[in-house]
Amino acid sequence: MSLIINQFVIGFCINFILIYIFCKIPLMTKGGWISAGILGTILWGCLSWQGWMSVVFYLLFGSLVTKIGYKFKKEQGIAEKRGGRRGSENVWGSAATGLVLAMMTKFNPSNEILFKVGFAASFSAKLADTFGSEIGKRFGKDTYLITSFKKVERGTEGGISIEGTLASIFGSILMAYIMLRLSIISTKYYFIVVIVSGFLATLFESIIGAKFQNKYKLSNELVNAIQTSIASIFSIFSLFLSSYFLN
């Protein structure tokens, strides 16, 4: 127990120092930095520095890809608000599912592997979504509604493009690779499960955007939480199935 408490204390101190140093960089709002500090502290306490670092990479790559072609996207009226800076709602919408799974590794250590794979899949899905959305809005030549393949304007909820879809696949692979290198996941099979789960959840997110988001006035943050939850559930269910058939 004292070791676990020490991990949380270390996480708090490191996050406090780093946020104090880097908070002037326009990656997040004030609320976003505070939320990131809370998130980082809990992740360090639950998954040590590897879990913390994986989310740092997610935030870094997500913020960088948002900046690509930002002037063009702003002129089109489809750019992220606040110059692409993440607020507290963005942090929790993207990371709430992963945070719960990280905490479950401590509450239920006998299923640690399942929770870690679900954790990895949730962030793989979110980075896939960010890459697909931002690259698609800037470089997508033609955008189609995923439910009907009718041509629509860039930035339409549920709209997909070839360029954006390829970017989503790359984002999912990139995040899964980071999780593998940081030993959050440990086998090639888990690596593939995380990639597939992340990408499929991104497609489901587009379907939700096309059919339900405007109809039921769902916020982007809620849709993000649903998407990451789908990825985690799919990845964990895949491990259950493989374990059942192998046994």
Image (tube, rainbow, N blue to C red):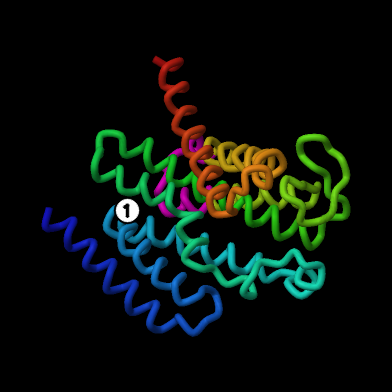
Tell me which residue sits at (81%, 60%) in the image.
139
Tell me which residue sits at (37%, 40%) in the image.
115
Which residue was labeled with disc 1?
47
The vertical placement of 193 against 225, above or below, is above
Q: Closest to the observer: 200 or 225? A: 225
User: In this picture, which residue range is highlighted in magenta?
Assistant: 176-191
**Is 221 placed left or right of 171 in the picture?**
left
Which residue in the rendered view is the most extreme toward the left? 2
Tell me which residue sits at (43%, 52%) in the image.
96
Q: At which x and y percent is residue 125?
A: 57, 46
Q: Quadrant of the C terminus?
A: top left
Which residue in the rendered view is the most extreme toward the front? 216
Disc 1 element: helix
Tell me which residue sits at (25%, 34%) in the image.
110
> Hey, what amino acid is under mark 1?
Leu
Q: Main secondary structure of the magenta part?
A: helix
Q: Closest to the observer: 184 or 215? A: 215
Q: Closest to the observer: 156 or 232? A: 156
Q: Is residue 180 magenta?
A: yes
Q: Is residue 177 magenta?
A: yes
**Is 99 placed left or right of 140 in the picture?**
left
